[in-house]
Image (spheres, rainbow, N blue to C red):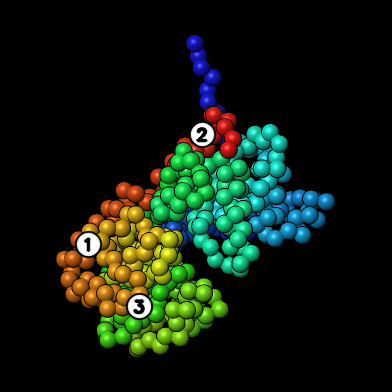
């Protein structure tokens, strides 16, 4: 007997209001080795994308209604109107997953399945009303409007199962993806140290740790440290925006290819993180590790599970400038230690955080949902 050939699921990826509208230009920059692959799931999965540019295709009453809604809600509604064209909708970030989940709940006898990619689902920041909604409404939306959840952080994934009563078979196991071809080891003189990022960074501790030292350091942050308007309450409470720093410490934004050069020139990469259950700093830590750099970072509750103190990184306690200083000095002065930790770091990223493991997990979840037809 000849079995019917299994068809691939038709996948729509809801990219977000901030998605790069010029996908061809982005692909050109990736091909030219000037940008890392942003892991456009629609490219890897052979699906279609839906972003703010697609909203212009609606006319009449629908266009008017979309114009009244906030960006992410409008995107979710626009994608929902096109749901019959697809088998699986993938939403990228909580801001898109929640409104799509609500629409899925309100759809009688829905055929389409929903995979929600949730980076920090238990992050209770914002106003009192927003925190209350996250505690009460978010679990209901996840349980009844998402057929699968992809939560890359191991602690966040476990807490979602415990606090939201989500069965383990509804969680897609995939870890933060990194373009290991772009973020690759590059020979360069180790003339500096660096720190990267902004969100939940404890730059006050870093600057204090560096105060008696003489090596140069560049902090590749999106904003100046003294600009407290862009920080969280915890960041402002840390005093990071008020901390003076010595000569030899510079700060400024770096484009991706410039950041890669900075990593390559750094003997040590320091990612100081505020205490948190989220895996803050994951992108910067994995970029540096993928380049074979020796990383010093904070041992927070939500740290990446791939981190192994003394093996592929050095971990220090939160808000401990003395411990951070000691770790920086030990790596700065010991080339053999740096090389060993950097080699193990690269190997750990290749084994656990490359792009294929992320895409394979998404593809497997989409195939399973299409094959079984099971709704949440």
The answer to which image quadrant residue 111 occupies is top right
Q: Secondary structure at mark 2?
A: helix
Tell me if residue 11 can be seen.
no
Real-space Cα separation, disc 2 to disc 3, in angstroms = 46 Å
Q: Nearer the viewer, residue 17 or 129?
A: 129
- The answer to whether mark 2 and mark 1 are in CB contact below 8 A is no
Q: Nearer the viewer, residue 356 or 103?
A: 103
- Spot occupied by residue 53 in the image (x, y as percentages of width and height): 67, 55
Residue labelled with disc 1: 310
- Residue at image position (51%, 74%) is 233
Number of other residues with Cα within 10 Å of mark 3, as a class: few under 14, some 14 to 19, many 20 or more: many
Q: Residue furthest right?
A: 60
Q: Nearer the viewer, residue 169 or 225?
A: 169
- Spot occupied by residue 318 in the image (x, y as percentages of width and height): 35, 71
Viewer-side label of 2, 1: 1
Residue labelled with disc 2: 367
Q: Which quarter of the figure is the C terminus placed in?
A: top right
Real-space Cα separation, disc 2 to disc 1, in angstroms = 40 Å
Mark 2 or mark 3: name the one nearer the start of the chain.
Answer: 3
């Amino acid at each position: 007997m000849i079995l019917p050939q299994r068809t691939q699921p038709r996948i729509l990826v809801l990219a977000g209001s901030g998605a790069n509208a010029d996908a061809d230009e982005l692909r050109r920059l990736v091909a030219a080795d000037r940008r890392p692959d942003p892991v456009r799931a629609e490219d890897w999965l052979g699906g279609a994308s839906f972003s703010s540019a697609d909203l212009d295709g609606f006319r009449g009453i629908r266009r008017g209604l979309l114009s009244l809604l906030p960006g992410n809600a409008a995107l979710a509604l626009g994608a929902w109107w096109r749901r019959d064209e697809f088998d699986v909708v993938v939403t990228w970030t909580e801001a898109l997953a929640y409104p799509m989940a609500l629409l899925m709940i309100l759809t009688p006898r829905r055929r389409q399945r929903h995979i929600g990619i949730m980076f920090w689902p238990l992050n209770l920041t914002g106003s009192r009303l927003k925190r209350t909604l996250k505690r009460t409404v978010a679990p209901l939306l996840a349980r009844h409007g998402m057929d699968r959840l992809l939560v890359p952080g191991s602690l966040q994934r476990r807490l979602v199962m415990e606090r939201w009563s989500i069965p383990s078979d509804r969680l897609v196991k995939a870890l933060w993806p990194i373009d290991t071809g772009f973020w690759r080891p590059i020979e360069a003189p180790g003339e500096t140290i660096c720190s990267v990022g902004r969100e939940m960074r404890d730059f006050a501790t870093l600057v204090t740790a560096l105060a008696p030292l003489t090596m140069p350091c560049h902090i590749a942050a999106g904003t100046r440290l003294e600009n407290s308007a862009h920080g969280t309450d915890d960041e402002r409470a840390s005093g990071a925006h008020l901390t003076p720093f010595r000569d030899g410490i510079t700060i400024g934004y770096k484009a991706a290819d410039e950041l890669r050069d900075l990593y390559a020139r750094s003997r040590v990469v320091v990612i100081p993180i505020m205490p948190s259950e989220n895996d803050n700093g994951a992108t910067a830590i994995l970029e540096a590790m993928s380049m074979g750099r020796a990383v010093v970072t904070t041992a927070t509750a939500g740290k990446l599970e791939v981190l192994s103190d003394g093996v592929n990184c050095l971990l220090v306690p939160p808000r401990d400038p003395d411990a951070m200083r000691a770790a920086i000095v030990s790596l700065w002065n010991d080339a053999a230690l740096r090389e060993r930790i950097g080699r193990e770091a690269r190997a750990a990223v290749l084994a656990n955080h490359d792009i294929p493991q992320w895409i394979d997990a998404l593809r497997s979840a989409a195939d399973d949902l299409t094959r079984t037809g099971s709704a949440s």
